[in-house]
Every structure is written in structure tokens, then in C-alpha cells.
Amino acid sequence: MKTAFFLAAVASAIVLGAAAQADDTPAELRAGMVAGYLKPAELPDSVALLPPPPALNSPSEAVDQQVARDTLALQGGDRFKLAAIDADLTFPNAAGTFSCAIGVAITADDTPTLYKLLHRVEADAGGATGAAKDKYQHARPFMLDYRPTCTPKFETALRASGSYPSGHTSIGWAWAQILAEIAPERSDAILARGRAFGESRLVCNAHWASDVEEGRTVASATVARLHASAEFRADLATAATELQAARDKGLKPQRDCDFEAQTLKATPWLTP
């Protein structure tokens, strides 16, 4: 079945068809996924936006293969465990991804608009990768090296969705850009965490380096489109106010920040 909206396969283990987010679809979709801010026709066209994935035996494909080989050494370690946490795009888990970087908890109770915004942007940034995924149906690393992923029970679903570009990376990088906008004083930490979120897909053995790189491209295009939405801009302003209120209350991140910081230090092989 053609996958036009493979959004968070690891999170929901389902494939959303192109018609799943028609203009008259209720805001709440299936399996806890919510509708984004953008209509399908408003999403960036990832086929027009991106080049094809690296050709066999090209220099870019050689880089993909080398990075994939290097990351296999991390299987079973703490970085692999963090990659599995990052792979889970369901809420409330996903809402905590940037809590250490931003310095406060992001929850439905304490920051409801920000929580909702991140959930809706997930649909937009993930959905925007669908056209290229469908067109190229690029095989994932674990399908070629026969090594496990960090989420083995979802490997069947991952096989049904093209690797290029990475939907997880698009979602994580979109989140990072948006959070950096409303918390500019923490932007370095937020963007570093956003980069690491995409790199988790390499550690997970689910994506190639080129998938992650172009996932960020799709994310940037999606965030640019989102800023044309008055509803998104209004929620963004409210989210900034909520974030400051959460800081004033002294709310602590809902993740183990020491574990995260130490784990992310152990990835020098991803530094250019």
C-alpha cells in the first residue's frame, strides 16, 4: 500500500493514507495522532524540494554506508537506549524530548498550548516527508545489514515506509527550531538536542545519514510554512507565555538530564 502519510511508524505502528487528513477530517485522527496546522496541499513538496537519495556506488552512498557501520558499535549501550526513547513519538513521552534542553517540564497540565503545538507540528513535519518516501522507497540500513533496530517490534512497519527522508528527523528538527524561537536564550542547547534527535535514527539502525540530513531540510521548509498560519502564530505566542510561567513555578524537566547529557557526549563519531 502506498504510504503518503507514514507518520511515526515507531510510535503508532500504522500507516496513515493520503486521505487521512482531508480538509473536513476532525482534528483528532487515529491512534492518538492529531491533525496539524497545515492542510495537505499546504505541506512542502518533498519530491520537489529534495534531490534523489544517493545513487549506488556514489560518494554520498559511501558516506551513508560508513556512518551506518560506525554506529553499529553503539548497539546495546546507553546511546542505543536513548535512541529508543527518541523513537517513541507518542505523547506524553515525546513532549519531554526537549525538557532538559529547555530547562522545564513540557506537559499537558502545565504548558497545554505548547504541548498541543508540538503534537500538531508532529503531524505537519512528519507528513511533509511522505511524498519523497513514497516516490523513492529507499531501503533502510537494517534491511541490508540484518542487524536489529532500537525498536524491533516495529521493524515490519518500518519496512513498509521508505527511508528517505527521515520523518523522525523532520519532526525533531521542526520542534527544535520552534522551541529555539520561543526560548532564544536556550537555543544552543535546544538545537543541539534537535540534532541529536535526528542522529538517534542512525544509532537506531533505521536511517542513513542522507535521510537525516534531508529530514532537516523538510523540517525547515515546514516551519517556514507554519509561520504563514495565523493559528500557529497565535499558539506560538501563547506557548512562550506558558513557558515563562513554568519557569517561574520552578518546574523541573521530566527526563533524567544527567543521563541524557552524559550519553550525548559519547557520540564524537557524528561530529564533522
Image: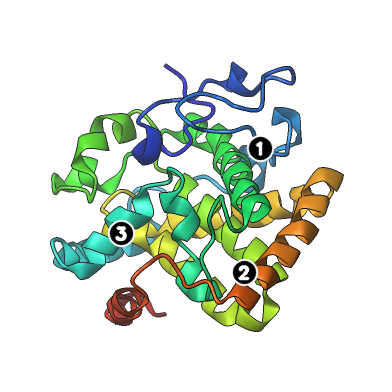
Q: Is residue 242 above or below residue 11?
A: below
How far is disc 1 from disc 3 in space, using C-alphas? 25 Å
Viewed as shown, does residue 239 lie left or right of 209?
right
Q: Quadrant of residue 212?
A: bottom left
In terms of secondary structure, where does tag 2 sit?
Answer: helix
In terms of secondary structure, where does tag 1 sit?
Answer: loop
Mark 2, residue position: 246
How far is disc 1 from disc 2 in space, using C-alphas? 25 Å
The x and y percentages for residue 203 are 28, 61
Viewed as shown, does residue 21 lie left or right of 166?
right
Q: Nearer the viewer, residue 61 or 31?
A: 31
Q: Is residue 112 above or below residue 12?
A: below
Disc number lying in front (1 or 2): 2
Badge number at residue 81: none
* Picture residue at 79% right of the left edge, 60% below the top: 237
Disc number lying in front (3 or 2): 2
Quadrant for the C terminus in the image: bottom left
Q: Amino acid at mark 2?
A: Ala
